[in-house]
Image (cartoon, grey):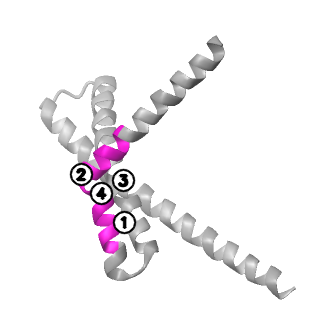
Amino acid sequence: MIVMLVIIGAGIGIGLFACAVAATLVALGVVSSSVALGFFTKRPATGVRVFLLQCGVLAGIPAGAVTAWLGRTLFEMADERWLIAVYGGIGGALAGAVLALLLDFIFRRSHAWLEARRSLKSEI
C-alpha cells in the first residue's frame, strides 16, 4: 500500500511538472507560434522544426547564464556581474539554437532513412 501511494505521488508530481512546463510554453507563445507557422506553410514538419528551435533557445539562455556564472567563479574573472549573465545568456541561446538545429537534422535524416527502409520492405 505504501509503495502504491509513493508511486501515485510521484506520478502526480511528474504530471504537475509537465503541466507547468506546458503552461510556460503556451504563455511564452512557443506552442502557438509553432502551430501557426505549421498551418501557414501547410507543413507540420516546419512547425515541429520551429518548436525545437524555440525550445532550444529558451533552454539555452538560463543554461548559458548559469554556466557563465560558474565559469566566472572557477576562473575568478572579476567583471560586472550582470554582464556575465548577459554574455552567458547570449552564448546559451546560440548553443541552444545549434543543438536544436542538430536535433532537427538528426530527426530528418532518421525519418528519411526509415521511409526508405519502409519503401524497400513494401516492394519485397
Q: Earlier in the sequence, mark 4 or mark 3?
A: 4
Task: Indicate whether 8 appears above or below 61.
Answer: above
Q: Nearer the viewer, residue 117 or 12?
A: 12
Residue range corresponding to the magenta coloring: 20-37
Tell me where residue 113 sits by quadrant: bottom right
Question: Regarding mark 1 in the picture, which secondary structure is present there?
Answer: helix
Q: Are marks 4 and 2 in contact (CB under 8 Å)?
A: yes
Left or right of 17? Residue 37 is left
The magenta stretch spans residue 28: yes
Tell me where residue 42 sits by quadrant: bottom left
Q: Which mark is residue 55?
A: 3
The amino acid marked with disc number 4 is Val
Q: Which mark is residue 30?
A: 4
Residue picked out by circle 1: 50
3 or 2: mark nearer the eye: 2
Residue lying furthest top in this view? 2
The amino acid marked with disc number 2 is Leu
Residue 96 at x, y percent in the picture: 37, 52
Q: Earlier in the sequence, mark 3 or mark 2?
A: 2
Q: State how far apart marks 4 and 1 are (Cα).
A: 9 Å
Q: Earlier in the sequence, mark 1 or mark 2?
A: 2
Quarter placement of the C terminus: bottom right
Q: Are marks 3 and 2 in contact (CB under 8 Å)?
A: no
Q: Are marks 4 and 3 in contact (CB under 8 Å)?
A: yes
Q: State how far apart marks 4 and 2 are (Cα).
A: 6 Å
Q: Nearer the viewer, residue 110 or 86?
A: 110
The amino acid marked with disc number 3 is Cys
Q: Earlier in the sequence, mark 3 or mark 1?
A: 1
The amino acid marked with disc number 1 is Val
